[in-house]
Image (tube, grey):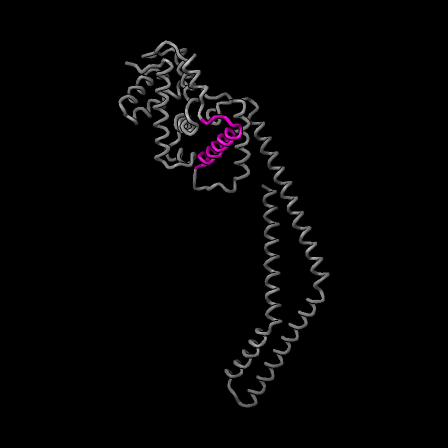
Amino acid sequence: MNDAPGSYTRWRAAEAGERDDDADWAFRTVFQTTVPEPVVSPDFTARTMAAVAAAAAADARRARRVRAGVLTGCAAGAAAAVYFGTGWAISLASSAFIALLNMVIAGTVRGATSFQAGAGVWPVVASLGRAAAALATDPTVTFAMIALSALAIAALVALQRLLGSDQESLQ
Amino acid sequence: MIARITGDRAHAEDLAQDTFVKAFRNLAAFDTTRRFSSWLFRIAHNTAIDAMRRSNRPLESIDANREMAAGGAHEPAAAPAPDPVERRELGRALELALTGLRPDQRAAIVLRYEHGLSFGDIATVLGVPEATARSHVHRARKELAQRLTASGWAPPR
């Protein structure tokens, strides 16, 4: 399209006549036929690809460092928890176990008593429920359940972060 | 686009490289419901503007105005003939006039007339409402016409 001068005339006329659409159209032709495109150096693509590759490698290194840091932190935390918390954990677990045992015994006794007294199925179920509720409201058991839930959530979050770092490295 | 906004072709390639690296690093943040080119242009535009701010370059070129007023003028070309030399001259005058515009107007002109973007896409790239993008293009074109007149490219009669 070799219409620059004609388009230039049309553009200026349209601009002077406040015909915006015409001016827009004519100026497009003027611009595209007269203004040369900036020259790009021949090695631009290669240099850009190298820069992107270098950035990707730097990102992967950073992700590996973060992952190593998280793993080291987790390992240190786990070691400290094992060292300082083993006794406490055993005590907590045994308390929970005893409480569970108490519940089973209480349930059995209540069930047997109810059957002996000739009660129906529902009073037996109700007495078992009461025994279970007594277990759940025991502060030791409640605390153990909360601690286990927190531990599981922390483990899931750590795992998700580690998998995320892996995916970033692959990208 | 970066070369046109900054007016520095050598530095523009480095900035274009930065643009691609930033795009690569933020690829996960790209909204796939939008146009990739607009997203890339937006990064390029922001990179160019940031670079100009960092180097304390004036966001409105004065040198270009001065050059046009002093040495850029030549014989008026009321009705340019279909001559390659004259077309080249007009192109150079237009390029020079372009460097005198404000960066946002310059970007709007380049996006509209060099890359063929719609006003909506220009608005996305510049981070402004569509009406503002339209106004940038309109005003920039008017200003280019004035600058061309001042440099000797008078409107044909």
- Compared across the picture, whether B104 is left or right of A56 comes to left
Of residues A88 and A119, the one nearer the viewer is A88
Residue found at the very far left of the displayed protein: A17
The residue at 53%/39% (across/down) is B26
- Whether A93 is drawn above or below B145: the answer is below
Q: Position of residue B153 (x, y in %)?
A: 35, 14
Which image quadrant is residue A117 in? Answer: bottom right
Which image quadrant is residue A21 in? Answer: top left
Q: Position of residue A35 (x, y in %)?
A: 42, 19
- Compared across the picture, whether A86 is left or right of A7 comes to right
- Whether B9 is drawn above or below A82: the answer is above
- Whether A131 is drawn above or below B138: the answer is below
Magenta span main SS: helix
The residue at 52%/42% (across/down) is B28
Of residues B49 and A38, the one nearer the viewer is B49
The residue at 55%/34% (across/down) is B21
Residue A29 magenta: no
- Compared across the picture, whether B95 is left or right of A55 comes to left
Residue B58 magenta: yes
